[in-house]
Image (cartoon, grey):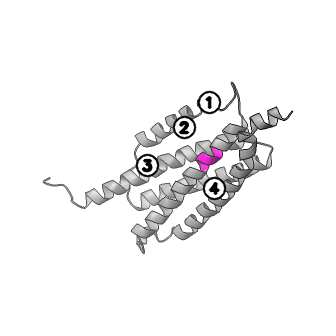
Amino acid sequence: MRGMNVAMFPMRRLDVYLNDHLAGAMVGAELSRRAAENNRGTTLGDFLEELHREIVEDRQTLQRVMTALGVERSALKPAGAWVLEKAGRLKLNGQIRGYSPLSRLVELEGLETGVSGKRALWQALSSAFPGDPRLAHFNLDGLVARAEEQLESIGEQRLVAAPDALTERAVTASR
């Protein structure tokens, strides 16, 4: 312990926490990009393109927050998250190949989960660092509000997508 700064321990937890969220933000950016591409030319696709832009902006904000707080970035966590996001594409979606209505629903649920985590991040930072001058130029309350708006919109889109994804047999049976 000689020569070790005891104040490092709280920052180490902060490093882990923010790097985990940065990895999640990378997954969210990849997922939102893929979902937007798969729904291009539709109202949902337009919504997802805008959501993707906002998710990328929020990830960049998180990177600036990490810099402001002196957080060391992990090279492994984002790489691992990237691999997991790619592996997540291999799940069954109710058809042999291609994109299905179930894919759309699962992607929206994944985005909703990610944005909920992002909202929790902004809330936690606001609670843990009230009045901290390092975060003075970040509008954490505005970031929380933006995440809440995103959650509301994703939830609406998810409910629109659910009938197509979940009632396939009922539609086929009624033909």
In the image, residue 35 sits, relative to residue 53, either above or below, namely above
Residue 160 in the figure: left or right of residue 129: right
Give the secondary structure at mark 3: helix
Q: Amino acid at mark 4?
A: Glu
- Relative image position of residue 134 (x, y in whole percent): 42, 68
Q: Amino acid at mark 3?
A: Asp
Residue 18 in the figure: left or right of residue 115: left
The disc placed on residue 92 is 1
Label 2, label 1: how far apart the Cα atoms are: 15 Å
Give the secondary structure at mark 1: loop
The answer to which quarter of the image holds residue 94 is: top right
For label 4, the residue is 54
Q: Amino acid at mark 1?
A: Leu
In the image, residue 3 sits, relative to residue 82, either above or below, namely below
For label 3, the residue is 20
**2 or 4: mark nearer the eye:** 2
For label 2, the residue is 85
